Amino acid sequence: MKTKFNRFIIISLAFALFASSLMFSSSALELEAPENTLELNCKSAVLMEASTGKVLYAQNPDEALPPASVTKIMTLLLVMEAIDSGKISLNDMVSASEYAASMGGSQVYLKVGETMSVEDMLKSVVISSANDAAVALAEFVSGDVNTFVKQMNDRAKELGMTATQFENVTGLDDTAENHLTSAKDIALMSRALIEHPTILKYSSIWMDTIRNGAFGLTNTNRLVRFYRGATGLKTGSTSKAGFCVSVTAERDGLSLICVIMGAESRDVRNAQATKLLDWGFANYTSYCAEAQAAQEIRVLGGVQSRCPVGSDTFRAVLLKGSISKVEQKIEIDEQAAAPLKIGDTVGRVQYLIDGEVIGEVPVTVKQDVAKIGFWGLWQRLLAKILML
């Protein structure tokens, strides 16, 4: 009887240990992958890491909704691309057309024929969401608004924005019938826009002036002043769209893009953006592995017998506390046949955590190597004979 009782105790203890191990494993898994349980008070939301484009949080991310003035992110992207390509410059003077001066909503009250520099027009759009300045810039870049809107839609397709259709450059939607985009699409165009550093220079300004100090600009994005690390980017609100925002922020090398659509008020929108950004910075960190130092591999049939190779920088966004677990696995071909061109792939560097690949970068050729010709081969053979 006593033996049976002891056996029962042993079995019970074993079961308890097994059950506790399951509970521990479950808790560990929860720590490894934070659940999307924020329950944000808005129609849709996305949190994206800027350097990789990885979506960290999504709430109804693909529904096409009216974006209000967040539309201007695409307007600004096309303007910045025109500046960086040399098509226009910040010092060019823009004249306001009758149509631009007729814009309602947020504006800097351009008069017909008034001239202003591209830079001041740009600041007016970025900081104060000026509809009249947005139209004036669109006309200056493309000749007319319709052409510019077509370019906006073409660029959206290039960026993989699948739920987007622009009808104007401002986001005004009183007469718009199908002017829509999604939270994910807004994150995609925001990521493209902040690749132009000049935008962050302006979008992080709280207050500024134009017209030689006669007209004040105040940023419509209050988070730029009140959220630590905020750098921009664009707000918007209409009766159709509700209150929307795309916020960019950076802390400790981690750059986030937070999109909120369809909030019921400005304060709710800002609170939800703050909540989502706080969640992102609390749970994630940026990982960067610098480019691998160049090595050499043998070249078969080339004018050179060896060639330098190396890998590019690898970036990833990881859960906090996991960087110490990252391991590298390098695979490089011992030799390659000529001809070789810079950029040819001859291997890879994989990055792993607990044996699972989190990403990889190619190992590529860093120098052109031409194929050796008959006379080059003959000279090489002759040199070897003379050395004997």
Image (cartoon, rainbow, N blue to C red):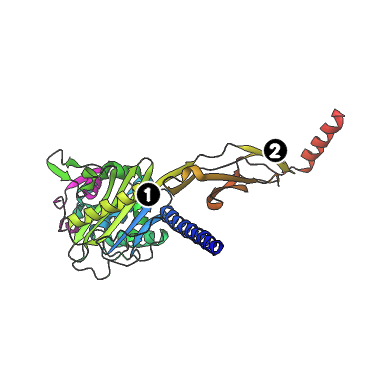
**Residue at x 17% of width, y 41% of height:** 209
Residue 100: say if magenta.
yes
Q: Where the N terminus falls, by quadrant?
A: bottom right
Front one among 229 and 160: 229
Q: Amino acid at mark 2?
A: Arg
Q: Report which residue position mark 2 lands on.
A: 306
Residues drawn in magenta: 98-126
Please state if 290 lies on the left or on the right of 185 as rendered. right
Amino acid type at circle 1 is Asn
Residue lying at the far left of the rendered structure: 214
Q: Quadrant of the C terminus?
A: top right
Q: Is residue 15 magenta?
A: no
Residue 151 appears in the figure: no
> Which label is found at residue 283?
1
Residue 320, given in percent of the width and then of the height, sits at 41, 46
Q: Residue furthest top?
A: 387
Task: Give SS at disc 2.
Answer: strand
Percent across and percent down for residue 186 are 33, 58
Query: Which mark identifies residue 294?
Result: none
Q: Distance from label 2 to label 1 (Cα)?
A: 45 Å
